[in-house]
Image (tube, rainbow, N blue to C red):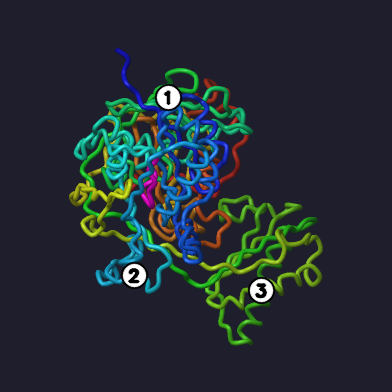
């Protein structure tokens, strides 16, 4: 008998993803379910403002526009849809979808899941005096949004009730997939290994083509960027799943592309905390089953915690970011001086007008490796660069003045200024994130379908028990480097990075198992921290995923406030792994003779200011 498998395709990794992806997956004829992810912290704030202006808004309209022409095919093929596109107004999103279905001549049962939006209970929550879970800051006075990250049980309940489409508000990204598998296979709330496996399936596809060749370190090997294939997971009742994509589409599905996505933004891989389960991905294995097919197995789980993570956003002054190109001789030096001069000039004018000083300033010369700090080549001989100036102030008019005065650079400062990108910059509100924990018992969850409101019982959870990090396998022998050569990290590894609030996550995967002991020795927390020392304000943690020969780093306090508040050009740490790929790594010189690519990489090594550390890591 053929094993029953459920095929789930993901058409969106964020609000603004391709409008064609859903059609690609639906018309592939290979999926049973279509899922999508539209929400991020800044998105919640934007949707809150939209609903404040119009009570019929508060959800991403792209979702309805994308799904509307596919309604007949979805109904005909029996494809069921699960998405967090309900935003902060899932009932309004359902109404828009119902109108689209009626116009298409189809009937679909649409359920909404409610309970995540806590704005009506802010005073009650404030009385509990929760503190920010990373910084310990006190609860803000005025919020723009406040949403709990719900889990998968309510989604499974809605599907059990017969919903064709399930709309959620804020939930963890992987829950839209896990809820389907709980429904289809009857997984219980205490089947922790299965819940972890289903969560991993959701995590792999939640960012769309990031697991099918998108953002892959070996980008030149990835075909078909113009028609990237969006991911499909074919899931079995035992928790194993195969990652693939529609036939004839671009991209590639390999153990390396999938591994890069697994390490993406997970923090401690042995304690990836979700509302339904605490996941352990350290022993996950990846097997290439054939072209564009990777089998994933080995996730483990334990009881969830008794709290939800809640993300609130609030206004915190104003910011402006301006960019201009500077070309010609000494472009970098000219740009740097221009940036500092413009800030000083507008600071003086604002102070004289009684507006106060800037709260924060940032000057980055893109093209001169300013973002690399001390490890950069500081290419002051660059002949074309981009000057970026970022400013934060409590008074919007102070930044309006900056926008007017910045144009003076075109006539009063250095030759080679070619004009502002996008014209005169305009201030925008700073939206800051405040994350805290709230007991699950304080967050009632319900499914609404066909006029009936069904309460959903959620596992209460237990406090997280710290676990000692696993020791490296005793059988692993470090190679002798008494006679060594240096190669850049990219010769030995793939990498992927992203943000977790104001922290950056960098995952490094060894290209071959025998490279892992070298990476373990060379990539100490001290050395990685020194590489990003010009940004780092906290500690560096390192964990190991021996199942597929990987290391995972978390750099605390390294993003200038985080994606929705930072003045950085890369506020989410998306480039960090690729920057680290240039770090020199010592390998036995005998390896070069045995491996042609390593020999070529050794010839291209760049000098480094980061010392090799021999001391062991203090692993958390």
Spot occupied by residue 190 in the image (x, y as percentages of width and height): 19, 39
The residue under the point 44% across, 27% down is 77
The residue under the point 52% across, 20% down is 594
Mark 1 packing: few (<14 Cα in 10 Å), some, or many (20+)?
many
The quarter in which the N terminus is drawn is: top left
- Residue 345, above or below 380: below
| Mark in front: 3 vs 2 | 2
Circle 1: element type: strand
- Residue 346, above or below 278: below
Q: Which residue lies under the disc numbered 3?
A: 402
Q: CA distance from mark 2 to mark 1?
A: 45 Å
179 sits to left or right of 584: left
Instruction: State which tag comes first along the sequence, 3 or 2.
Output: 2
Spot occupied by residue 458 in the image (x, y as percentages of width and height): 22, 48
Q: Which mark is residue 139?
A: 2
Picture quadrant where residue 597 is located: top right
Q: Which residue lies under the disc numbered 1?
A: 294
- Residue 620, above or below 433: above
Outermost top residue: 1
Q: Which mark is residue 571?
A: none
Picture quadrant where residue 476 is located: top left
Q: Is residue 484 visible?
A: no
446 sits to left or right of 397: left
The residue under the point 37% across, 59% down is 311
Nearer to me, 554 or 446: 446
Which residue range is magenta in the image? 165-173
599 sits to left or right of 71: right
Q: CA distance from mark 3 to mark 2?
A: 32 Å
Whether residue 139 is in magenta: the answer is no
Mark 2 packing: few (<14 Cα in 10 Å), some, or many (20+)?
some
């Amino acid at each position: 008998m053929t094993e029953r498998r459920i095929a789930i395709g993901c058409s969106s990794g964020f609000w603004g993803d391709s409008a064609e992806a859903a059609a690609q997956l639906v018309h592939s004829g290979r999926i049973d379910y279509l899922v999508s992810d539209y929400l991020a912290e800044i998105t919640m704030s934007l949707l809150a403002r939209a609903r404040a202006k119009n009570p019929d808004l508060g959800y991403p309209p792209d979702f309805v526009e994308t799904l509307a022409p596919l309604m007949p095919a979805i109904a005909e093929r029996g494809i069921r849809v699960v998405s967090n596109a309900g935003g902060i107004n899932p009932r309004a999103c359902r109404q828009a979808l119902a109108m689209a279905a009626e116009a298409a001549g189809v009937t679909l049962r649409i359920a909404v899941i409610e309970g995540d939006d806590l704005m009506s209970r802010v005073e009650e929550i404030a009385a509990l005096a929760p503190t920010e879970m990373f910084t310990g800051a006190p609860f803000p006075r005025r919020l723009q949004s406040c949403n709990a990250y719900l889990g998968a049980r309510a989604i499974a309940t809605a599907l059990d009730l017969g919903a064709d489409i399930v709309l959620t508000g804020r939930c963890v990204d992987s829950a839209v997939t896990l809820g389907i598998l709980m429904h289809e296979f009857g997984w219980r709330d205490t089947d922790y290994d299965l819940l972890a496996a289903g969560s991993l399936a959701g995590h792999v596809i939640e960012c769309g083509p990031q697991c099918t060749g998108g953002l892959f370190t070996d980008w030149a090997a990835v075909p078909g960027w113009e028609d990237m294939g969006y991911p499909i997971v074919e899931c079995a009742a035992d928790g194993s799943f195969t990652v693939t994509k529609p036939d004839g589409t671009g991209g590639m599905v390999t153990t390396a592309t999938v591994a890069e996505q697994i390490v993406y933004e997970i923090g401690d891989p042995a304690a990836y905390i979700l509302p339904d389960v605490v996941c352990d991905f350290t022993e996950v294995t990846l097997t290439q089953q054939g072209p564009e097919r990777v089998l994933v197995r080995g996730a483990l789980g334990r009881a969830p915690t008794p709290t939800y993570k809640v993300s609130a956003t609030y206004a915190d002054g104003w910011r402006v970011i301006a960019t201009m190109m500077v070309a010609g001789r000494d472009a970098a030096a000219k740009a740097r001086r221009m940036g500092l001069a413009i800030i000083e000039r507008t600071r003086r004018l604002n102070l004289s007008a009684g507006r106060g000083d800037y709260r924060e300033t940032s000057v980055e010369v893109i093209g001169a490796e300013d973002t690399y700090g001390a490890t950069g080549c500081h290419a002051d001989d660059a002949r074309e660069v981009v000057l970026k100036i970022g400013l934060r102030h409590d008074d919007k008019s102070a930044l309006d003045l900056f926008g007017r005065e910045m144009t003076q650079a075109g006539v009063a400062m250095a030759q080679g200024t070619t004009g502002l990108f996008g014209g005169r910059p305009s201030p925008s509100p700073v939206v800051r994130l405040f994350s805290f924990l709230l007991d699950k018992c304080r967050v009632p969850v319900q499914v609404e379908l066909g006029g009936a409101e069904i309460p959903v019982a959620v596992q209460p959870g237990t406090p997280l028990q710290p676990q000692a990090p696993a020791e490296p396998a005793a059988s692993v022998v470090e190679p002798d480097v008494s006679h060594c050569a240096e190669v850049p990290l990219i010769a030995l590894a793939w990498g992927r990075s992203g943000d977790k609030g104001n922290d950056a996550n960098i995952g490094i995967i060894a290209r071959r198992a025998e490279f892992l002991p070298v990476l373990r020795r060379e990539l100490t927390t001290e050395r990685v921290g020194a590489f990003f020392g010009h940004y780092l304000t906290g500690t560096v943690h390192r964990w190991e995923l021996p199942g597929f020969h990987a290391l995972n780093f978390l750099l605390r306090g390294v993003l200038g406030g985080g994606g929705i508040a930072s003045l950085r050009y890369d506020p989410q740490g998306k480039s960090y792994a690729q920057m680290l790929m240039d770090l020199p790594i010592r390998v036995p010189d005998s390896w070069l003779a045995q491996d042609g690519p390593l020999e070529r990489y050794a010839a291209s090594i760049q000098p480094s200011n980061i010392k090799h550390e021999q001391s062991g890591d203090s692993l958390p």
